[in-house]
Amino acid sequence: MLHYHLAQLNIAKMKYPIGSAEMADFVDNLENINLLADSSPGFVWRLQTEDGDATDIDFFGSDVLVNMSIWVDIESLHAYVYKTAHAKIMSRRKEWFHRVEEAYTVLWWVAEGHIPSLAEAREKIERLKSAGPGPLAFSFKQAYPPPGVE
């Protein structure tokens, strides 16, 4: 039987360059937030460069930060996002990132062992923007179970 994990993509358009004084508090907290994710129950994988984060990845534009990770299930990701120090630091996101009117986070199921590409992630967020939530691309607000689960 095929097993699935939950993939997530989150993008954020920065108000300031990543090396600026205005972004310093965000950058200073990034390593700890990433370490917290890495050690959280249900964590599987996250996108990162050799520097240990994804701040140098400009797939969506040089002013857009990308976060992509894989989790065992939606409950594990939800607990990390909303019930850890991650929630406290991200409550300050308005200081560092522009408000986005369209979808900036997307969730989808991947076969266990599959690591999605950024192109796959872009397709998922574009699907969510154009078609709304569905089994192939969804959000926390309207989540869908893994394939084969009712």
Image: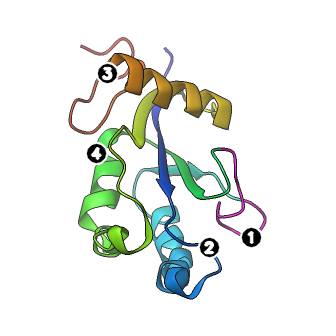
Q: Which amino acid does label 2 sit on?
A: Ile
Q: Which quarter of the figure has residue 24?
A: bottom right
Classify 100 as above or below 36. Answer: above
Q: In the current view of this chain or complex, which residue is farthest to the right?
A: 50
From mark 3 to mark 1, how far is it between C-alphas? 35 Å
Q: Which of the two discs, 1 and 2, labels the residue nearer the N terminus?
A: 2
Q: Classify mark 2: helix, strand or loop.
A: loop
Q: Classify mark 4: helix, strand or loop.
A: helix
Q: Which of the two discs, 2 and 4, labels the residue nearer the N terminus?
A: 2
Classify 64 as above or below 119. Answer: below
Residue 3 vs residue 95: left or right? Answer: right
From mark 2 to mark 3, how far is it between C-alphas? 31 Å
Viewer-nearest of discs 3 and 1: 3
Residue that carries the numbered disc 3 in the rendered image: 132
- Taking the image as drawn, is residue 4 in sight? no
Residue that carries the numbered disc 4 in the rendered image: 75
Q: Which quarter of the figure has residue 63?
A: bottom right
Q: Which amino acid does label 4 sit on?
A: Glu
From mark 4 to mark 3, how far is it between C-alphas? 21 Å
Residue that carries the numbered disc 2 in the rendered image: 18
